[in-house]
Amino acid sequence: MGVIDAADEMQYTAVHFDLRIVMELLQQTIAEKRTNQRFILIEGLCNSNKLASEDAQLELRFMDEIFAIEKCLGEVDSCVSLTFC
């Protein structure tokens, strides 16, 4: 039985868009919604495995995305990758 992609991630995941624009959107959203909470949970980044070709998947390393997050949003305390087969 195949995996159901209810959120249509293969088409709309952040990896399909310019990383700079994604970071700008995150900065704006955090600025608008931020409370006194110390941590922010960001879901849906570091997902180059959603790219169609194997070459494209190897082009964008997870660490590149982590470094981009730290550069734009601040220090990353933790990163968790949940995957399924």
Image (tube, grey):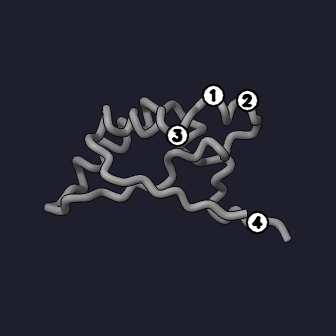
Q: Which residue is mark 4?
A: 3
- Of badges 2 and 4, the one in the foreground is 2
Q: Position of residue 77 (x, y in %)?
A: 31, 51
* Labels 2 & 4 near each other (Cβ < 8 A): no
Left or right: residue 32 compared with residue 10: left
Left or right: residue 12 compared with residue 79: right
Q: Which residue is mark 3?
A: 62
* Labels 3 & 1 near each other (Cβ < 8 A): no
The residue that appears at 48% across and 32% down in the rendered structure is: 64
- Of badges 3 and 4, the one in the foreground is 3
Q: Which residue is mark 1?
A: 59
Q: Which residue is mark 2?
A: 55
Q: Position of residue 65 (x, y in %)?
A: 47, 37
* Labels 1 & 2 near each other (Cβ < 8 A): yes
Split into 4 quadrants, where in the image is the C terminus?
Answer: bottom right
Q: Three-letter amino acid code at disc 2?
A: Asp
